Image: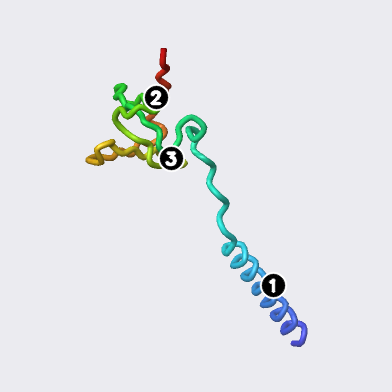
Amino acid sequence: MKSSTTRMGMAGALLAAVVVLVVAEGSRSAPEPALSRFADVLRVGDSVEIKDADSSYLIVQAADNIAVGYTVKKIGVDFIYFESFDGTSSLVIPVYSIKAIAKQLTL
């Protein structure tokens, strides 16, 4: 009888230890998400023109950051948020819908 009680006590202690480990693991803060693959090309505040390219978009950065159509407002892990210069419209484009990002050069 004593052996059975000891085993149950050990099993209870083991279960409690597992619960504590699981709770401690879940309470850790999540790692920072990786930056968007376009973060090194586009910057928040950049002036861009957005062209519809069939089922995707072509984003053209304006030369010398001249105001053209949209401003980059936020670059997320899987999206880019744009706002029109006059503030009347906004656009969120998922990264899988971006065909290319081009930079307009000055001559």
Mark 2 and mark 1 residues within 8 Å of each other at the beta carbon: no
Dot 3: within a 10 Å radius of its alpha carbon, few (fewer than 14), some, or many (20 or more) residues? many
Percent coordinates x, y for residue 88 in the rendering = 22, 40
Q: Residues within 10 Å of mark 1 (few under 14, many from 20)?
A: few
Picture residue at 32% right of the left edge, 29% below the top? 67
Q: What's under tag 1, amino acid-wise? A: Leu
Farthest residue, direction top: 107
Residue 76 location, quadrant? top left
SS type, badge 2:
strand
Mark positioned earlier in the residue sequence (2 or 1): 1
| Secondary structure under the numbered disc 3 in the rendered image | strand
The answer to whether residue 6 is left or right of residue 34 is right
Q: Quadrant of the N terminus?
A: bottom right
Badge nearest the viewer, 2 or 1: 2
Residue 72 horizontal side relative to residue 15, left or right: left
What is the CA distance from the residue labelled 3 to the residue labelled 2? 16 Å
- The numbered mark, 3 or 1, whose residue comes first in the sequence reads 1
Q: Which residue is mark 3?
A: 75
Please tell me how many numbered marks the rendered image carries. 3
| Residue 61 x, y percent position in the rendering | 39, 26
Residue 14 is labelled as 1
Q: Position of residue 39 (x, y in %)?
A: 49, 35
Say how the picture is coloured: rainbow
Q: Is residue 6 above or below residue 99?
A: below
- Which of these two is toward me, 94 or 39? 39
**Residue drawn at 41 percent across, 12 percent down:** 107
| 10 and 65: which is toward the camera | 65
Q: Position of residue 28 (x, y in %)?
A: 59, 61
**How far is the residue under mark 2 from the one under mark 1?**
54 Å
Quadrant hosting residue 44 = top left
Q: Is residue 16 left or right of residue 89?
A: right
